[in-house]
Amino acid sequence: MQLATLALLVSVVPPVVPSGAPLDTDPVGEWPLRPEPAVVEHFDPPDTPYGAGHRGVDLLGSPGQAVRAALAGQVTWSGTLAGRGVVVVSHGATRTTYEPVAGSVPVGTPVAAGDVVGSLERAGSHCFPRTCLHWGWIEGETYLDPLDLVGAGPVRLLPLWRDEPAAGGRAAPYAVPLPHPYAAWRPPVAGVPAGLR
């Protein structure tokens, strides 16, 4: 009976993800310029939808340099927007943007990560008179740091205090929060016995 109950629980109850395991990870992409370019301006998301900020990164390049899709997807825009050449590649829930780029792939074309989608233009460059590629990554209406796609984004730190050690590794000292040294202390109350305070 106990074995049958255990077998039923194993088949019905979903597996528990360890608390230290990531629930989702960024896809692994490729740099849109080769060789790996210098980052001239980092991602600085705006505080409000129309607020100031930098909604992507600027990568140093040269005029005419091949621009490549960072992830596999489908070209959904290739043309001029606000006087700049722009290429957009959709990847399901996200899309990457590249500007100023003279697109070389028609809209609707599927591309693999690393496929050339156009060439870098100097006119409209964010770092004029130098030539930079403005590379963006967007999920819905939320701007993301495209450097996360190539492992060059900001370091993500785990919280200092956890309720249990990270799975699969050596537990860090003090992985469990220590009680505050004054947690048990209560101010004296006149006329109330110590055991009832």
Image: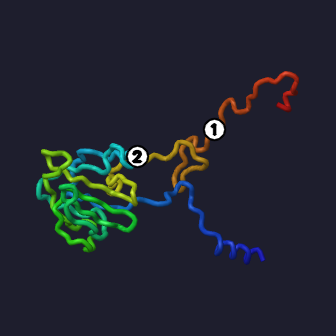
Q: Position of residue 139 (x, y in %)?
A: 39, 59
Judging depth in this view, the residue of 48 and 101 nearest the camera is 48
Q: Which residue is mark 2?
A: 48
Q: Residue visible at 26% across and 58% down?
A: 31
Query: In the image, residue 56 lies at what x, y percent?
Result: 30, 51
Residue at 38%, 68% in the rendered image: 92
Closest to the observer, 193 or 177: 193
| Residues tagged 1 and 2 counted as in contact (Cβ below 8 A) | no
Which residue is located at x 28 percent, y 59 percent?
Answer: 97
Q: Residues within 10 Å of mark 1 (few under 14, many from 20)?
A: few
Residue 108 falls in image quadrant: bottom left
Q: 150 or 191: nearer the eye?
A: 191
The answer to which quarter of the image holds residue 71 is: bottom left
Q: CA distance from mark 1 to mark 2?
A: 38 Å
Picture mark count: 2
User: Does residue 7 appear left or right of residue 167 in this picture?
Assistant: right
Assign a secondary structure to mark 2.
Answer: loop
Residue nearer the viewer, 103 or 38: 103
Q: Position of residue 187 (x, y in %)?
A: 76, 25
Local packing at callout 2 (Cα closer than 10 Å; few below 14, some 14-19, many 20+) is few
Q: Amino acid at mark 1?
A: Leu
Q: Which quarter of the figure has residue 191?
A: top right
**Does residue 90 appear left or right of residue 36 in this picture?**
right
For residue 178, which numbered disc appears in the image? 1
In the image, residue 16 sits, relative to residue 189, either above or below, namely: below
User: What secondary structure is marked by label 1?
Assistant: loop
Q: Nearer the viewer, mark 1 or mark 2?
A: 2
Work out whether 89 lies above or below 7.
above
Give the residue at the far top of this rendering: 190
Q: Is residue 72 left or right of residue 182?
A: left
Of labels 1 and 2, earlier in sequence is 2
Q: Residue at x 35, y 50 (%)?
A: 153
